[in-house]
Image (spheres, grey):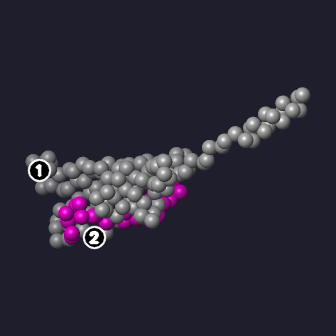
Amino acid sequence: MESSAFALILTLALAAPVAPAERKCLLSGSWQSDTGCRMVVSTLGEDGRFSGSYLPGSATGDSEILTLPLEGSQQDAGLVPQPIFSFTMHWRLQDSETAQTTVFLGQCYVGSNGEEILHALWLRREATNSPVEDWKATWVGTSIFTRIK
């Protein structure tokens, strides 16, 4: 009797559904934002630091902007499947002395359909000549990036 009970438990254990391994969101690769911007994360180090390039889209209204280098970091994707990330870009319009910096802070998700998506909050700061102009120097927004296949 003991051996048939053991066989039954063993059979049930082997037949039990096993949850598939959770898919990890990988930041490296090419992305496009909901406003038409393109981003390429070309180098992703083991320490979570990354670099790449960013091409602002038509939403910026500035056709004079060239591809911008970006630098950032993310949580260890080995520890969390959907890591938090941040990156910074410094830029200047052609023929302009106004410097700008944009920082992004977001999270890389894997949707129920298996598609990766980035949700990010951004702050864009423009240099001003005086504290009186400070009120108009910072913009805040959100972006959603999908992977370019």
In reply to whether residue 40 is colored magenta, the answer given is yes
* Vertical relation: 51 (above or below) 137: below
Q: Is residue 48 visible?
A: no
Is residue 134 inside the magenta stretch? no
Secondary structure, mark 1, is: helix
Amino acid bearing label 2: Leu
Looking at the picture, tell me which residue is in the foreground, 116 or 132: 116
Q: Tell me what residue is drawn at x 79 percent, y 37 percent.
A: 10
Residue 24 as seen in the image, left or right of residue 145:
right
Quarter assignment of residue 17:
top right
Q: Front-most of 35 and 1?
A: 1
Quarter placement of the N terminus: top right
Residue range highlighted in magenta: 39-64
Name the secondary structure under disc 2: loop
Q: Where the C terminus falls, by quadrant?
A: bottom left
Query: Which comes sooner in the sequence, label 2 or label 1?
Result: 2
Badge 2, how many Cα within 10 Å: few under 14, some, many 20+?
some
Q: Amino acid at mark 1?
A: Glu
Residue tagged 1: 133
Dots 2 and 1: beta carbons under 8 Å?
A: no
Q: Position of residue 145 (x, y in %)?
A: 37, 56
Instruction: Please provide percent x and percent y for residue 115.
Output: 47, 55
In space, the residues marked 2 and 1 are separated at their CA atoms by: 26 Å
Residue 64 image point, x, y percent: 21, 70
Residue found at x 89% / y 32%: 3
Q: Is residue 123 above or below residue 67?
A: above
Q: Does residue 80 appear in this view?
A: yes
Residue under the point 31% across and 57% down: 34
Q: Which residue is mark 2?
A: 66
Left or right of 125, for residue 84: right
